């Protein structure tokens, strides 16, 4: 990875290396996340050390790692919320003044070329040869570079959101499950025949009865 992959001066070569190290490899999904995060930083503000900025992501693809790294919205802090909609879309709120934007991918902006698509399908089916794997990663790098070379607004549309931000994360007491005896957040426990059960034990006992 080097400076030739940079889209602009917002993400420097050293920071790009750190993002790739955090995720594990460079790929088109990560590049999209970098570009989406740049819009969020521009529209909402700097890296969130606390819960001042909160994000909702509508996908669990590679892009989310770049968003976590660059915006400071993370699952652990409770200011990153996953909605499993399978969309390349992200909403960011700034709590101080309730400003919010939804960043969504433009249709057709990230289509693979036919060769890339075919190799990706062969890899997913477990049929790719070593040479095809190498070619796929070469195309991955080329596509990533192309995405990073674009302006973020070529890839995404940005619209204001008139909605209140999600509530701040809360810390709850952990209670021992009466079956597996593992501590479980009190809000996740369920009651079955007088027993306090974690979700897995609840489902197991319900189906076993």
Image (spheres, rainbow, N blue to C red):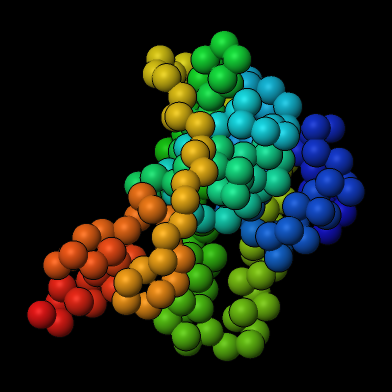
Total of numbered circles in the picture?
0
Q: Residue at x 65, y 85 (%)?
A: 131
Vertical placement of residue 188 versus 180, above or below? above
Q: Residue furthest front?
A: 194
Between 151 and 178, the residue placed more toward the observer is 178
Between 1 and 91, the residue placed more toward the observer is 91
Q: Residue at x 80, y 38 (%)?
A: 11
| Left or right placement of residue 47 versus residue 109 in this view | right
Can you say which quadrant of the picture contains the C terminus? bottom left
- The answer to whether any part of residue 104 appears in the image is yes
User: Residue 30's spot in the image, x, y percent?
Assistant: 63, 52
Vertical placement of residue 208 versus 36, above or below? below
| Left or right placement of residue 160 versus residue 75 in this view | left
Q: Residue at x 69, y 23 (%)?
A: 45
The picture quadrant where one finds residue 25 is bottom right
Q: Residue furthest top?
A: 97
Q: Residue at x 42, y 19 (%)?
A: 164
| Left or right placement of residue 77 versus residue 15 in this view | left
Between 165 and 146, the residue placed more toward the observer is 165
Q: Residue furthest left?
A: 209
User: Residue 127's spot in the image, x, y percent?
Assistant: 47, 87
Can you say which quadrant of the picture contains the N terminus? bottom right
User: Residue 155's spot in the image, x, y percent?
Assistant: 56, 35
| Left or right placement of residue 197 versus residue 156 in this view | left
- The answer to whether any part of residue 108 appears in the image is no
């Amino acid at each position: 990875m080097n400076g030739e992959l940079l889209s602009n001066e917002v993400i420097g070569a050293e920071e790009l290396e750190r993002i790739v190290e955090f995720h594990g490899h460079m790929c088109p999904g990560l590049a999209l996340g970098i570009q989406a995060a740049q819009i969020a930083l521009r529209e909402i503000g700097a890296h969130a050390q606390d819960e001042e900025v909160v994000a909702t992501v509508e996908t669990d693809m590679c892009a989310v790692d770049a968003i976590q790294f660059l915006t400071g919205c993370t699952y652990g802090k409770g200011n990153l919320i996953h909605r499993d909609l399978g969309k390349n879309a992200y909403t960011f709120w700034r709590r101080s003044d309730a400003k919010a934007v939804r960043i969504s991918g433009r249709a057709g902006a990230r289509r693979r070329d036919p060769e890339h698509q075919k190799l990706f399908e062969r890899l997913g089916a477990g049929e790719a040869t070593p040479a095809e794997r190498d070619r796929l990663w070469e195309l991955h790098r080329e596509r990533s570079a192309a995405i990073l070379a674009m302006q973020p607004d070529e890839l995404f549309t940005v619209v204001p959101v008139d909605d209140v931000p999600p509530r701040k994360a809360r810390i709850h007491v952990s209670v021992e499950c009466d079956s597996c005896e593992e501590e479980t957040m009190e809000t996740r426990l369920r009651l079955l025949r007088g027993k306090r059960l974690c979700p897995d034990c609840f489902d197991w006992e319900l189906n076993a009865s």
